[in-house]
Image (cartoon, helix red, strand yellow):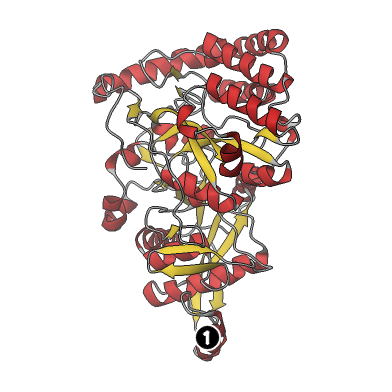
Amino acid sequence: MKRQRNTGLVWLATVVPAAAMLCTACAMNAQKQELPTIRMYTVGSSSDAACERIGEALSALTAEHLGFAVEITQTSTAGYDNTLSRALLQGEDIDLFCYSDMENIFSLVSDGKAAALNDWLDEFPVLRDTVPDDYWACMTYNGQIVGVPGNNPNSYAIGFEVRADIMAALGVSAADIHTMEDMGELLRLAKAEFPDITPLVPHFGQPLQALDIDPLNNGLGVLLGNTGTEVVDLYSTDYFADLCEQMHTWYQEGLMLADAPLTNIPNTRALALYDGFSLSQRVSRRNIISVNRSSGVPLETIVLGPRIQNTATLNICWCINAQSSTQDQRRALQLLEFLYTDHEAADLLLYGMEGIDYRRLDAQTVTTIDPKPKEEWNTIHWGQPNSEIVSEWIWADGRKVAYTEPRGTKISPAYGFTYTPSAELRPIVSNCLQIVGKYENALLSGYLDPEETLPLFQAELQEAGISTIVADKQAQLDAWLAQNGNSQADMSESPAGKS
């Protein structure tokens, strides 16, 4: 059983001017009470002081509504998966955690990291009913619900964000760019007119954030084009070879950051650091708002096709620690339900404190504060329980973020399917993923010559047993389709869904 921590509630309410917060602090300190504390582990790059400040603000809300306090720990995106895995393995005192390592999500419950939520959800009907049924299906492995999916967009289009000032100087409209070939020509034009810029910057070493596939969880066996029901080895396809060749050409022409695979920073920071022009993007309304907010410069959206929808587009979930006490697991789910449904709490977790971390324009809109505080609250929208209920971020002058709506949604026939390798296959999966990590990003960044390197990559995967994984995944998908029907197979295009 986990120890129960006690903490005193301190000073602040979230939606009051900064000057009034000190008075609130005095009042609350006078009424300190010892409460149990739930520790929450999530994505972000805030300082310990900022985490403590927002934890205390959230505790002021949870103490009133739920009867416990909250501690928040953040780890940056770059090392989040490994740091979280190590913390859980070492038995750190974590009750509720954001999980983003979707390649290994199947192992959460079986490895004792997360408690299955099937029985718990009957106790939390509001949370259960607020999350769409298809979202729950995407978090179910071997019949066990491993986490609560973040209520983020369940589809996105492949595209790019480009600086609006450079596009205006070039006299080019984002609406005229429809293909990767068009994008290459735009990068060449930008490079010719502005030779000192970096035409395309990476995101944590990845120049491309999305491919036109359904990865079927781990990318070892995919559905090409997000269509059909034949599982294929992506890395042996003409699609992958052609894309690697295209990226190598861009690299040789100086259209991409030369050391892209070696960088470990977000694309918005790379945009400023390397005087970037464009970045790859999973295009959805919330993603576009987030990248504009983070970069601080107006961007325009280039859309290269319809939205893609598959199980992997729901790329995070929230889990309760299997090692926490039953009482703390219940409290963790109470906290998650509160964050999923309460507008004030959701705003606090994403934006921080009004008057300190952001400026409110009206009841439903906020903007960046200037100057930013020294101990800034710094987190990301996709790491939230429910980014759809937060206030809208807009530019300080009242302009909304420009957004191009993708036309239609290409739904994978395997949407809702989750792949679970057997215990015997898990070492093979692990070995293949290590090989993918060794080659894929370096090839897609143009850093390696595909004519020389791709055959080595393919040979190592075959030797490691990727064919066995593809066959196993095909068998599991066929069984799933037989049980669930193939109603999505004929829905290659659907009306635009939620974004």
- The residue identified by callout 1 is 20
Q: Nearer the viewer, residue 234 or 365?
A: 365
Would residue 61 be visible to someone looking at this image? Answer: yes
Left or right relative to 141: residue 273: right
Work out which quarter of the rendered image holds the C terminus and state it: top left
Q: Position of residue 219 (x, y in %)?
A: 51, 24
Would residue 309 be visible to someone looking at this image? Answer: no
Q: Position of residue 68 (x, y in %)?
A: 45, 72
Q: Residues within 10 Å of mark 1 (few under 14, many from 20)?
A: few
Q: Position of residue 57 (x, y in %)?
A: 51, 73
Q: Nearer the viewer, residue 70 or 90?
A: 70
Left or right relative to 135: residue 36: right
User: Which residue is drawn at the image coordinates 34% and 60% (left, top)?
Assistant: 341
Say how many tags the image has.
1
User: Which residue is drawn at the image coordinates 47% and 23% (left, top)?
Assistant: 212
Q: Nearer the viewer, residue 303 or 72?
A: 303
Q: Position of residue 239 (x, y in %)?
A: 52, 13
Looking at the rendered structure, the secondary structure element under dot 1 is helix
